[in-house]
Amino acid sequence: MNSALIFVLILVSIVMCANIIETWLKQKKKTSPDGEQELVDTLAKIEQMEDRIKVLERIVTENRFDLKKEIDSL
């Protein structure tokens, strides 16, 4: 398989897991009012991860990345 495809699949799975965790934490918050700060911290971390993933996706899809990869393979 193409390594870029594998990378994208991994990124998609990370985002999906983050959404599942976010939903779980929201449900936990409804049952536990003292876990609000933990939820806020976790949601902030998830947003940071999503931003990093967007940057990584942009780097992988840039033409320069492919060119560097082709040069390295020569």
Image: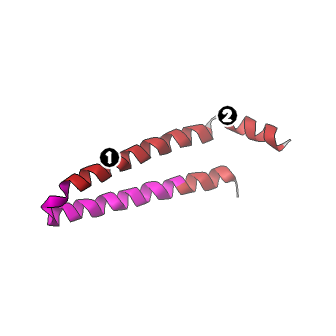
From what the image shows, is residue 30 above or below residue 65? below
Q: Which quadrant: the N terminus?
A: bottom right
Q: Residue at x 80, y 37 (%)?
A: 71
In the image: residue 32, left or right of residue 42: left
Q: Which quadrant: the C terminus?
A: top right
- Residue type at tag 2: Asn
- Magenta residues span 11-36
Return the residue at label 2. 63
Judge by depth and name the residue closer to the eye, 68 or 35.
35
Return the residue at label 1. 44
Distance between mark 2 and mark 1 Cα atoms: 31 Å
Q: Position of residue 41 (x, y in %)?
A: 28, 50
Q: Please tell me whether the stretch drawn in magenta is mainly helix, strand or loop.
A: helix
- 61 magenta-colored: no
Determine contact: label 2, label 1, CB under 8 Å.
no
Query: Which residue in the rendered view is the most extreme toward the top?
Result: 64
